[in-house]
C-alpha cells in the first residue's frame, strides 16, 4: 500500500499541515495586530473563507442553510466572539502565551460537557485539569510584564471557544463541515465589517498577506477535518499541541519575543495535561496498558501466553517456566 493510500499516515500528514497553517495564520495576524484593528483582522480572516465555502458548497450541492440551523448559529456566534477576543489579546501579549491560553478550550469544553452531556467525572479528568492548571501557573508566574488585560481576553476567548466545541459535538455528522465553516465565516465577516466605520489604511503590498490569512484559516480547518475523518481523532489530536512550542520558538526567532526556561517547562507540563485528557482511549477512567495497546494497535492475544484472557505478570511467569522446561 502506498503512502497516499494509507489513511493513518494521511491523517498524521493532514494534522501536521493543520498545525503549520494555523501557526502561519496566527503569526501573520500577530505581525499586523499593531497596525490593524481586531475587527479588520477578523474580516480578512473570514471573508475569503466565505467565498471558498460558497464555491465548494455550490459545486458539491451542499445546502447553505444546513440541517441544525440553531446549533450552527450558536456555534458560529460563539466562534465569532472567541475570535474577536483572540485578536484583541494577541496585540498585547506574546504569541506563545496566547496559544497556550487558547488551548484551554478543551478543558473548558470538558467542564461544560459534564453539564450538557452528563459526562461522568473521573480521575483522568481530575489529573488533566490539575496538571494543566499547574502548567498555566508556571507560565504566567514567570511571564513578567505580560498584560493582565491580554491574559483575561485570551482566557475569555478560550472559555467561549469551549462552548463552540460543545456545539460542534452536538452537531456531529448531521451537517457538512463546509456548512459549519460557512456559518462561522459569515458571522465573523459581518462582525468584521464593523471595521469599515474605522478603517485603518492598508498598504497595497500587504494585501496579499492579509488575504492569505483567510486562505490559511480555511486550509487549517479543512486539514483538521480531514485528519479527524481519516484517522482516529484521539490519536492525531495530540499532534496539534506541538503548535504551542512551535509558536514560542518562532515568536522568539521572528518576533523577538523572549521566554524563560520556566515558560517552556510550563508549556511542556500543559501539553502533558492535554495529552492525558485524550489518552484514556477506552474511557474507563484510568490510564493503563489497555490504552497503550489501543494506541499502538497491539494484538494483546499474542502476549496472553497462559491464555487466561489477560495480559499481566502471570504471562511472564508462564513464559519463563515454559522456556525453563525446554
Image (spheres, rainbow, N blue to C red):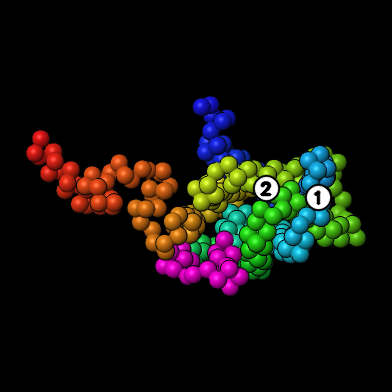
Judge left or right: residue 24 versus residue 72: left
Q: CA distance from mark 2 to mark 1?
A: 19 Å
Specify the label residue 221 is tagged with. Answer: 2
Which of the 4 image quadrants contains residue 302? top left
276 relative to 209 in the view: left or right:
left
Picture disc at residue 63:
1
Can residue 212 be seen here? The reply is: yes
Residue at 72 percent across and 49 percent down: it is 176
Verify whether residue 127 appears in magenta: yes
Q: Nearer the viewer, residue 244 or 51?
A: 51
Label 2 or label 1, whichever lies nearer to me, is 1
Q: Determine if residue 273 is in view.
A: no
Please tell me which residue is depicted at 58% across the width and 42% down the height of the picture. Answer: 230
Q: Earlier in the sequence, mark 2 or mark 1?
A: 1
Image quarter where the C terminus lies is top left
Label 1 neighbour load within 10 Å: few <14, some 14-19, many 20+: few
Per the rendered image, the range of residues in magenta is 106-131
Question: Helix or strand or loop: what does disc 1 sit on?
Answer: loop
Q: Residue at x 56, y 30 (%)?
A: 5
Residue 251's disc number = none
- On the image, the x and y values in percent for residue 67 come to 76, 57
Q: Position of residue 171 (x, y in %)?
A: 68, 59
The secondary structure type at the circle numbered 2 is: helix
In the image, 170 versus 262, the foreground residue is 170
Amino acid at each position: 500500500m502506498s503512502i497516499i493510500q494509507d489513511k493513518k499516515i494521511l491523517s498524521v500528514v493532514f494534522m501536521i499541515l493543520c498545525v503549520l497553517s494555523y501557526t502561519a495564520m496566527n503569526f501573520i495576524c500577530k505581525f499586523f495586530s499593531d497596525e490593524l484593528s481586531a475587527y479588520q483582522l477578523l474580516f480578512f480572516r473570514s471573508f475569503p473563507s466565505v467565498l471558498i465555502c460558497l464555491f465548494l458548497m455550490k459545486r458539491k450541492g451542499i445546502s447553505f442553510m444546513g440541517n441544525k440551523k440553531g446549533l450552527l448559529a450558536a456555534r458560529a456566534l460563539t466562534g465569532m466572539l472567541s475570535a474577536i477576543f483572540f485578536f484583541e489579546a494577541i496585540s498585547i501579549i506574546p504569541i506563545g502565551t496566547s496559544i497556550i491560553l487558547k488551548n484551554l478550550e478543551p478543558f473548558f469544553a470538558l467542564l461544560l460537557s459534564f453539564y450538557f452531556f452528563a459526562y461522568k467525572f473521573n480521575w483522568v479528568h481530575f489529573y488533566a485539569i490539575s496538571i494543566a492548571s499547574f502548567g498555566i501557573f508556571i507560565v504566567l508566574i514567570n511571564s513578567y510584564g505580560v498584560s493582565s488585560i491580554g491574559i483575561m481576553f485570551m482566557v475569555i476567548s478560550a472559555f467561549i471557544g469551549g462552548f463552540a466545541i460543545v456545539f460542534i459535538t452536538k452537531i456531529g455528522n448531521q451537517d457538512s463541515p463546509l456548512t459549519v465553516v460557512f456559518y462561522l465565516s459569515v458571522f465573523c465577516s459581518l462582525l468584521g465589517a464593523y471595521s469599515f466605520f474605522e478603517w485603518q489604511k492598508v498598504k497595497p503590498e500587504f494585501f496579499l498577506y492579509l488575504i492569505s490569512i483567510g486562505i490559511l484559516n480555511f486550509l487549517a480547518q479543512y486539514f483538521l477535518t480531514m485528519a479527524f475523518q481519516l484517522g482516529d481523532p484521539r490519536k492525531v489530536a495530540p499532534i496539534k499541541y506541538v503548535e504551542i512550542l512551535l509558536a514560542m520558538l518562532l515568536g522568539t526567532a521572528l518576533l523577538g519575543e523572549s521566554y524563560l526556561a520556566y515558560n517552556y517547562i510550563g508549556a511542556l507540563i500543559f501539553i502533558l495535561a492535554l495529552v492525558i485528557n485524550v489518552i484514556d482511549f477506552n474511557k474507563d477512567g484510568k490510564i493503563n496498558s489497555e490504552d497503550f495497546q489501543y494506541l499502538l494497535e497491539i494484538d494483546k492475544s499474542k502476549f496472553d501466553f497462559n491464555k487466561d484472557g489477560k495480559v499481566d505478570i502471570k504471562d511472564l511467569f508462564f513464559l519463563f517456566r515454559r522456556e525453563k522446561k525446554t
